[in-house]
Image (cartoon, rainbow, N blue to C red):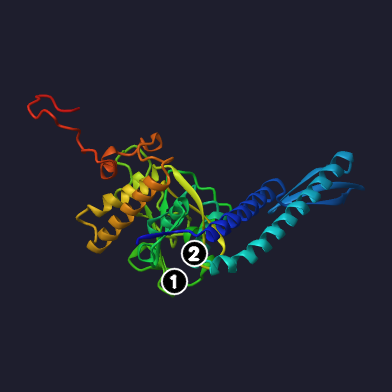
């Protein structure tokens, strides 16, 4: 069987883990946005002033007064309150991790989960980069409440889908220079770019990361897309792959998966319906490796069936997917690619 349903115990544990992880994420985001940096008093010219420092930037909020004292107290108390929540939820996730492993919930390879978390911390995940390829199935199986058979999700590489149309906003200063390779080396410093394959990197264990993107536009006026995320010439240069525009143009799907070490990870992938029909399209291409075509078809058919059965609220006929070529959906909807030719004697084409 190509998938199995989650048990009631697995379902309950997964939901609890997602809720705690959601609290941790929203709390961390609030701490970084509302209470970023630090506040302190400093005496200058015989008066005390309140200063706030964020990163390397420091500015004065004014001399000591009831207003600045109130601002200082609110900032200090707010930070301490959120830090208490973070400590509590972090400890709870630490206790949940071995239980998640024991229940068989750990699905995403640990190396992949750590890469994805670093992409998220850098501000790239979901904005400039999405998880494509086989690893997206870990997010989709959670959506459908199943575990996909291991032979359909086992792989030694991860594909990062790069959307060069969106503006880069790296939240980690050093990664402005190092880009994707900086992210990878924070996870494992043995990652190196593969010779003659500037879009791919591998670590000492042979695990590979590919950076892929749709081909550039034929519009001669349009500016040439940026193939590298970082400014360093040693960063990965995205490989242009045909057909990826459909995935880039599809809505994003965000879900939580559990890593092999038991910890949750936020996954941002293309819409599962677009991913499924893209897999079926790949399986029909003559230039696709024969072994990969068979797996593409099995993965695509499985996800189509699961979405039809388990998620009728997400139909393939949805307006959300209207920007994608209807030709793609002929694999799912059974529609002829060029219309239904009931009268072959017509002198006018079916415009």
Residue 259: x percent and y percent?
Answer: 51, 64
Residue 172 at least partly seen: no
Q: Left or right? Give the position of 129 relative to 282.
A: right
Q: Residue furthest top?
A: 347
Q: Counting other residues with Cα less than 10 Å from the Cα at mark 2, is it few (<14), some (14-19), or many (20 or more)?
A: many
Q: Secondary structure at mark 1?
A: loop
Q: Quadrant of residue 24?
A: bottom right
260 vs 76, nearest the viewer: 260
Picture coordinates of residue 198 (x, y %)? Answer: 37, 62
Which residue is tagged 1? Answer: 203
Classify residue 263 as left or right of residue 61.
Answer: left
Residue 299: x and y in percent read 33, 56
Q: Which mark is residue 236?
A: none
Question: Which quarter shows the N terminus?
Answer: bottom left
Residue at 78% over, 54% down: 80
Q: Which residue is mark 2?
A: 184
Q: Are marks 1 and 2 in contact (CB under 8 Å)?
A: yes
Q: Residue furthest right?
A: 46
Residue in front for this viewpoint, 234 or 179: 179
Q: Residue at x 34, y 49 (%)?
A: 304
Q: Residues within 10 Å of mark 1 (few under 14, many from 20)?
A: some
| Earlier residue among tags 1 and 2 | 2
């Amino acid at each position: 069987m190509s998938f199995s349903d989650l048990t009631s115990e697995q379902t309950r544990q997964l939901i609890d883990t997602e809720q705690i992880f959601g609290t941790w994420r929203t709390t961390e985001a609030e701490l970084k946005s509302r209470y970023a940096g630090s506040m302190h008093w400093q005496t200058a010219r015989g008066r005390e002033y309140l200063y706030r420092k964020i990163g390397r930037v420091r500015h004065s909020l004014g001399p000591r007064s009831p207003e600045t004292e109130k601002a200082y107290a609110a900032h200090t108390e707010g930070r301490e309150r959120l830090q208490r929540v973070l400590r509590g939820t972090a400890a709870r996730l630490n206790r949940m991790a071995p239980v998640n492993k024991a229940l068989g919930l750990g699905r995403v390879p640990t190396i992949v989960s750590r890469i994805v978390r670093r992409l998220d911390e850098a501000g790239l995940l979901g904005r400039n980069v999405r998880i494509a390829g086989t690893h997206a199935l870990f997010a989709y199986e959670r959506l459908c409440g199943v575990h996909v058979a291991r032979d359909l999700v086992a792989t030694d590489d991860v594909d990062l889908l790069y959307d060069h149309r969106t503006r880069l906003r790296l939240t980690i200063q050093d990664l402005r220079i190092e880009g994707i390779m900086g992210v990878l080396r924070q996870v494992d410093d043995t990652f190196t770019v593969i010779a003659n394959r500037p879009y791919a990197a591998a670590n000492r264990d042979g695990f590979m990361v590919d950076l892929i993107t749709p081909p550039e536009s034929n519009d001669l006026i349009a500016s040439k897309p940026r193939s590298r995320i970082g400014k360093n010439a040693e960063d990965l240069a995205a490989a242009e792959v045909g057909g990826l525009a459909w995935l880039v143009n599809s809505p994003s799907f965000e879900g939580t998966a559990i890593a092999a070490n038991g910890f949750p990870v936020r996954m941002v992938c293309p819409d599962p319906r677009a991913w499924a029909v893209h897999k079926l399209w790949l399986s029909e291409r003559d230039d696709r490796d024969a072994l990969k075509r068979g797996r593409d078809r099995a993965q695509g058919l499985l996800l189509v069936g699961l979405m039809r059965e388990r998620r009728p609220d997400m139909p393939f006929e949805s307006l959300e997917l209207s920007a994608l070529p209807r030709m793609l959906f002929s694999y799912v909807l059974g529609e002829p690619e060029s219309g239904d030719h009931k009268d072959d004697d017509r002198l006018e084409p079916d415009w």
